């Protein structure tokens, strides 16, 4: 087996390793984000307040989200 960079097996192995590394990074990042959100919900933080507000007034929250998206889209 040659170690030439144009060897299909070498290219496939490098691609496989890159995909594995990216997969691990995404899993770690999403787990950390989930933990941060859960910790914020337990402490009565922003996500907890937003969840309560959305449950109390779902149409108002939807209208606010629509307006925020519209404003963000107009600026670009």
Image (cartoon, rainbow, N blue to C red):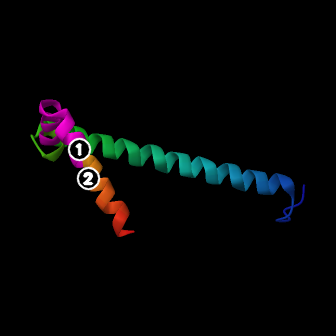
List the residue tagged with mark 2: 67
Answer left or right for 51 relative to 76.
Answer: left
Quarter of the figure that contains the N terminus? bottom right
Residue displayed at 42% across by 46% down:
28
Residue displayed at 20% across by 41% down:
61
Residue displayed at 33% across by 46% down:
32
Q: Residue furthest bottom?
A: 75
Q: Is residue 4 above or below residue 68?
A: below
Task: State yes or no: discs 2 and 1 in contact (Cβ < 8 Å).
Answer: yes
Q: Residues within 10 Å of mark 1 (few under 14, many from 20)?
A: few
Residue displayed at 37% across by 61% down:
73
Quarter of the figure that contains the C terminus? bottom left
Q: Residues within 10 Å of mark 2 (few under 14, many from 20)?
A: few
* Magenta-colored stretch includes residue 58: yes
Predominant SS of the magenta segment: helix
Q: Residue furthest right?
A: 1
Rendered image quadrant of residue 39: top left
Location of residue 16 in the rendering, given as x and y in whole percent from the top left corner: 69, 49
Badge 1 element: helix
Residue range (magenta): 49-64
């Amino acid at each position: 087996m040659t170690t030439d960079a144009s060897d299909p097996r070498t290219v496939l192995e490098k691609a496989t390793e890159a995909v594995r590394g990216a997969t691990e990074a995404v899993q770690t990042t999403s787990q950390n984000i989930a933990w941060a959100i859960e910790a914020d919900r337990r402490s009565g933080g922003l996500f907890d307040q937003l969840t309560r507000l959305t449950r109390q007034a779902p149409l108002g929250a939807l209208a606010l989200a629509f307006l925020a998206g519209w404003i963000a889209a107009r600026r670009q």
